[in-house]
Every structure is written in structure tokens, then in C-alpha cells.
Image (tube, grey):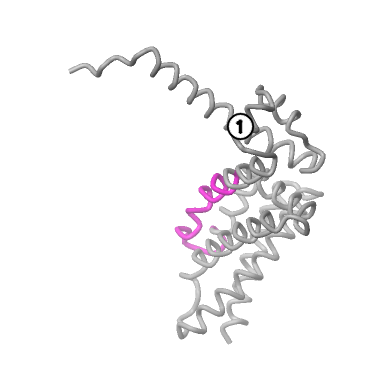
Amino acid sequence: MAPPEKSDETTKIDGRRLRGEATRAAAIKAAAELFASQGYSATGINSIAKAAGANSASLYHAFGSKEGLLAAVVEHASNEFFEQLDVLGDQPTPTQALRRLADSFEANPLFLRLLLILVLERGREDPVLLQTAIAVRERGRAMMADAMLAHLPDLPAARRAQVLDDLSRLLMLLVDGAFIARQVDADAERFRHLFDLMAAAMQGMVGELSA
């Protein structure tokens, strides 16, 4: 049995919804690129609307404010980035897990650059953004901890949890430094080599922290 035909009014509503979704996606993409390249304060809604092929009124309607657009950008970019990291825990060795992490950074540097710029620019005056950044980093740290879990020696549960916490925090510091180095002067090959060095350092840290 053929599905019932849509009325003209339903077709118009569907068309508006699809155009609205397309405008929203284009605005998030344009805002992420402009925030990351120009900074949040220097980027106006009009510039984002122009880059997205929309008008500023439609962006205010979709997001409510520039801050609302920023929240949507961070949410979208973080979800997109962490989808790439779901496989970390499946890697058979710490070296392969960290190489996979390096590949993810190399494939999608925009989100981390954006988050770093926004925190440095607005972290003190925007507690909501700061808490968002903290939540994103904790999510990433939890993924690192899960990936390392299988490679820890047999330890009492409480000690194992403490080692994982310490180790994941140390790795986050190393990853921060490696990512900044990549933006400044490291080429892709050297960037991957830094993650190989992290894996070697992690083996030593496991022994040190487990003692």
C-alpha cells in the first residue's frame, strides 16, 4: 500500500524544517572556524551569518544569542571529536592507542584549537564555558583511562584507580603540550613521534606509580 501523499501545507513545513536544519549546521560550521581563527570576541553574528549564507535574524531565532551559538558549537565539535576516540580502548598496546589519539588530533585539530582559544579568552568571565571545557577534558581523560586499564599490572582496586587517575592526568598534560607544539612548529611526523615517546614514558610511569 502506497504511503499517503503529503498535503501542500505539510510539504511546506517539512521544507522549512530541512532549511532550518541546514542553516543551523552551516552556522555551527562557520562559527567554529571563525571563533578558532579570529577569537570569540572579535567574531560577530553578522560575520557568521555571511559565512553561513544566512541572515543574522535566522541565527538569533535558531540559537537565541551569540552565547547560545557558542554552546552549540562546543557541543557539536566535542561530540564529533569524541566519536573518533571511541576506539582507543580497543587498541592492543599503549603505543597503538596513543598513535590513534595522534591521528584523531591530526584529522580534527579545529575543536581542540577552538576550546583552547575560548578558555584562554573567556574562561575567567564565562563560568559556563569554563565548566563546559572542564567536562570535555574530563570526558577525554576518562577515555584515556579506559584505554590504559588493560595495560596496568594486577593491583588492589583502590590502588589501581589511583594509578589510573594519576596516569591519565599526566598524559593529559603531555597531550596538551604536544598539541600546542603541533600548532607552533612540529610537523606531522614529529607530532606522531611525540606520541610514541609518550607511550614509552607511560610504561615507565606505570612502574613508578605502581610501586
Residue 32 sits inside the magenta stretch: no
Q: Position of residue 132 (x, y in %)?
A: 63, 56
Which of these two is toward me, 170 or 41?
A: 41
Q: Position of residue 143 (x, y in %)?
A: 53, 61
| Residue that lies at the very extreme toward the top in this rendered image | 8
Q: Amino acid at mark 1?
A: His
* Stretch of the chain drawn in magenta: 77-96
Q: How many marks?
A: 1
SS for dot 1: helix
Circle 1 crowding by C-alpha within 10 Å: few under 14, some 14–19, many from 20: few
**Residue at image coords 64%, 70%:** 169
Which of these two is toward me, 206 or 176?
A: 176
Q: Is residue 169 above or below residue 134?
A: below
**Residue at image coords 39%, 12%:** 8
Residue 80 sits inside the magenta stretch: yes
Q: Is residue 120 above or below residue 38?
A: below
Quadrant, the N terminus: top left
Q: Position of residue 114 (x, y in %)?
A: 71, 46
* Residue 180 sits in quarter: bottom right
**Residue at image coords 78%, 37%:** 43
Which of these two is toward me, 25 or 96?
A: 25
* Main secondary structure of the magenta stretch: helix
Q: Is residue 104 above or below residue 211?
A: above
For mark 1, what is the residue?
A: 61
Left or right: 15, with 130 as reference point: left
Quadrant, the C terminus: bottom right
| Residue that lies at the very extreme toward the left in this rendered image | 1
